[in-house]
Every structure is written in structure tokens, then in C-alpha cells.
Image (tube, helix red, strand yellow):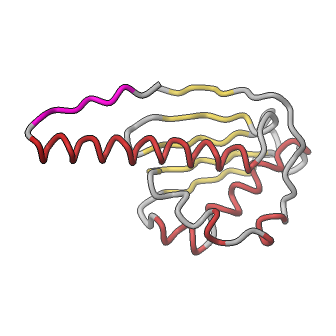
Amino acid sequence: MTRVILAPQRPLWSASAHARLPAALYGSMLKHLKRVVVQFNPADKTAAAARELLARVSTSTAKLSNPKCQVDYKVDEDLAQSFVELHFNNDEVQKLMTADVSAKDIQRIIELKSQELEIQTVFKEVGANCGHTVKPQMH
């Protein structure tokens, strides 16, 4: 299942800003991801979030958080809209059009989904340990 998420227009994230962020902010961002696909047109001014996210997920710190996460990218001068696809460990796929979001927004989406997956894991473990099946209601 692929969802296209459109968000209100926001100021673009600086492509060099990740160098000023502490590694802890994106050190575990790949933990719950199987694959990240980034595609952008290098001449497109609205592709800044795609380029920034690619820089973040390509750091050695991010790669150490999940060495099995596959990071694919394509730079295509004919591409009309830049996008990022996030493939989570639970097989959910989120497609984000990067003209509409910042890299910080994408990172926050990853963090929120990761927290949801962590909670689901805890519920499953608790249910297994007490002999009950716990089915969390996530919205």
C-alpha cells in the first residue's frame, strides 16, 4: 500500500544544514526502515528536502542504526516531481512529494512511525509474556 502525503508548503531545508545537527538526531532514523528511495531532479529548486534526506540517511551514524536498510537514489533530469519513499519493516510504504515537505518533516514522520512500531513491539511482547493477545488500536 502506497500513500501519497501532501503537506502545506513550508520553507525549504538548507542542503548543508545537516552538518550542523548533532548525530543523535538522525543516528537511529533507519532502525525501522527496510528501504529508502530518493528520486530528484538536480535542477529542481523544490528537491532540497530529497537531497537533504539522502545526505542524512547516507551518514555512517544512520547506516550503523540499521545496516540492512537499503538506500536507493536516482538523479533524473527528466523527473517532474522529486519524492521520497519510506518502506517500513511492517511493509507499510509512505511516498512523500518533497516539494511539499522539508527534510525535518520527513525525519519527524520517520520518528513517529518508529515510535508506533516500538509500541506495537512492546504490546506484542507483553501479550506473549502474560498469555494474552494484545491488539493495539493505532490511528
Note whether 46 is above or below 31 in the view shown.
above
Q: Position of residue 126 (x, y in %)?
A: 21, 45
Q: Residue 77, located in which quarter of the rendered image?
A: top right
Horizontal arrangement in the rendering, residue 60 relative to residue 70 (left or right):
right
Residue 136 magenta-highlighted? yes
Q: Position of residue 50 (x, y in %)?
A: 74, 49
Q: Residue 116, located in which quarter of the rendered image?
A: top left
Horizontal arrangement in the rendering, residue 103 relative to residue 69 (left or right):
right
Residue lying at 8% horizontally and 39% vertically, measured from the top left: 131
Note whether 127 is above or below 7 in the view shown.
below
Residue lying at 76% horizontally and 56% vertically, measured from the top left: 52
Q: Work out whether residue 125 or residue 61 is closer to the camera in this orientation and state it.
A: 125
Horizontal arrangement in the rendering, residue 23 relative to residue 94 (left or right):
right
Please state the total of marks drawn on the protein image. 0
Residue extending farthest to the front is 130
Residue extending farthest to the bottom is 60
Residue 63 magenta-highlighted? no
Residue lying at 23% horizontally and 42% vertically, measured from the top left: 124
Residue extending farthest to the left is 131
Note whether 137 is above or below 78 in the view shown.
above
Residue lying at 61% horizontally and 34% vertically, measured from the top left: 95
Q: Position of residue 118 (x, y in %)?
A: 39, 48
Q: Position of residue 107 (x, y in %)?
A: 65, 50
> Which SS type dominates the magenta stretch?
loop
Q: Which residues are magenta?
A: 132-137
